Amino acid sequence: MKFQNRDVLTGINLQVHSGEIVTLIGPNGAGKTTLVRIALGLQEPSSGQRLIRKGLRIGYMPQKLHVNDTMPLTVNRFLRLTGCRLTAVNDALSRTGVAHVLQSPLQSLSGGELQRVLLARALLHKPHLLVLDEPVQGVDVTGQKELYQLITDIRNESKNQESCAVLMVSHDLHLVMASTDKVVCINQHVCCSGHPHQVKKHPAYLRLFGGESDELAIYTHHHDHHHGVDGHVLESQNAPSKGSQ
Amino acid sequence: MPDILLYALLAGYGVAMLAAPLGCFVVWRKMAYFGDTLSHSALLGVSLGLMLNININLAVIFSSLMVAIILISFQEKQRIASDTLLGILAHSSLSIGLVTISFADNVRVDMMSYLFGDLLATGPTDLCWIYGGGFLVLATLAWLWKPMLAMSVHAELAQVEGIPVRKLRMVLTLLMALVIAVAMKIVGVLLITSLMIIPAATAQRFAKTPEQMVVFAALLGIMGVSGGLAASWYFDTPAGPSVVVSSFILFLMTQIVKKKY
């Protein structure tokens, strides 16, 4: 992917299989959002291909809904703009735990409630692929755990019927969801990818959250190369100058 | 009631009802400057129409659409900041229009009436344009109402959900060009956007749903037209600006009322 002849993403190969949870991590400006936009079909890559299964339904939860406070809209109306029935809307809202805000104006919701409403909207069309751009941004730690649990439940529930895959961008470099099957770390190219480690017993984790949890995991990883300020891979003396681990 | 006043009232009410839904979209989508640019470019259409001797309304629709297409294609490339581009196109097209007209010495036109409108000069033909065009605009909006709302709340979310956002954006622009073409005679190219925005912005405070906002905006627009025409009739003030001033007074008055949340 190029922006004005500057390479933003190169040599990316990202696969999401059904029923799989893939988390994208990377520093600011690494191209996470661009990659997600390409995956969603919102942006055409300057080279390369986007292959999707025919008839794939995508549920998208954008990074933040800039609620246009000039439009008077209740949560109910907001969700029914998708063409769904009231029962479906109610189901989706109870699913994400915010059934009580059905008749509230969109502008009056708290940050956490809004995230859940957005997740409900992404779920409305029974997606095969759920794309979440920093779903827990601005949500406190307890709320994060709850949301992650919810996302895991959604994947597990759908496992029996039609598997729902999840592609998620994480706001944190090291903290990802425990149920993630694959973590992909990108910085203009794929730096590394792999499984996250359980962190239940990790002392740093215990210090931070004061208790055990099943929802969060630490993705410990070391890169064999360094990036300059412009994002280019720098030659390093002691590491082999190959691509990813 | 003299014919001249009846025509003016009917024309004003028609434009107010037309401007209401589009004005709401302009407010929701934060397109005020875009609307301004479109209406400024209408003058280019006027000069084209006069030079080539074709129907002025059609020429205005055509030129507004051309400017809109240039704008949208430039915006997609994102070479220049959007508002800079809008500023360039708005005043360039207005100036090109004025310069072109000055070359045509065989046509004598009252530029003031195109810039500020001449509501009291409305005739039956204008009424046909307003109500004919108005029906077309309102029918299209009613037909595409839901996807248009979805696009205005969050364009990318709507696009992922399969709504043809690009096409809808073009349709909305086309409708705005149409309204500008028919409303130009009434309030003039410099004041058209205010007729769309002010009632919509006033209505926003009281509405609980998007539809309510449109209806309130239409009613407020009609009140503005009535007030402006009354002032124009009794105190001999210019009609177009008087309509805008009376809408503005309504806006100011409602700012005292406390907002819902």
Image: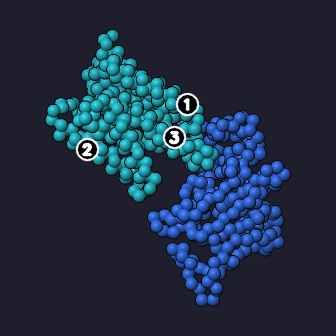
Chain colours: A blue, B cyan
CB within 8 Å, label 1 to label 2:
no
Q: Which residue lies furthest to the bottom in this view?
A: A237
Q: Does residue B156 appear in the picture of this structure?
A: yes
Amino acid beneath label 2? Ile
Q: Residues within 10 Å of mark 2 (few under 14, many from 20)?
A: some
Specify the amino acid type for callout 3: Leu
For marks 1 and 2, give the CA distance: 36 Å
Q: Residue A233: give x, y in percent of width and height.
A: 56, 78
Instruction: Kindly identify which residue carries mark 3.
Output: B168
Q: Earlier in the sequence, mark 3 or mark 1?
A: 1
Image mark 3: chain = B
Which residue shows up at 47% across the image and 41% down it? Answer: B170
Label 3 Cα neighbours within 10 Å, binned few <14 / some 14-19 / many ≥20:
some
Q: Label 1: how many residues lie within 10 Å, few (<14), some (14-19) or many (20+)? A: few
Q: How many marks?
A: 3
Task: Please tell me which residue is depicted at 54% across the width and 29% down the height of the picture.
Answer: B142
* Residue under numbered circle 2: B96
Q: Is residue A223 above or below residue B21?
A: below
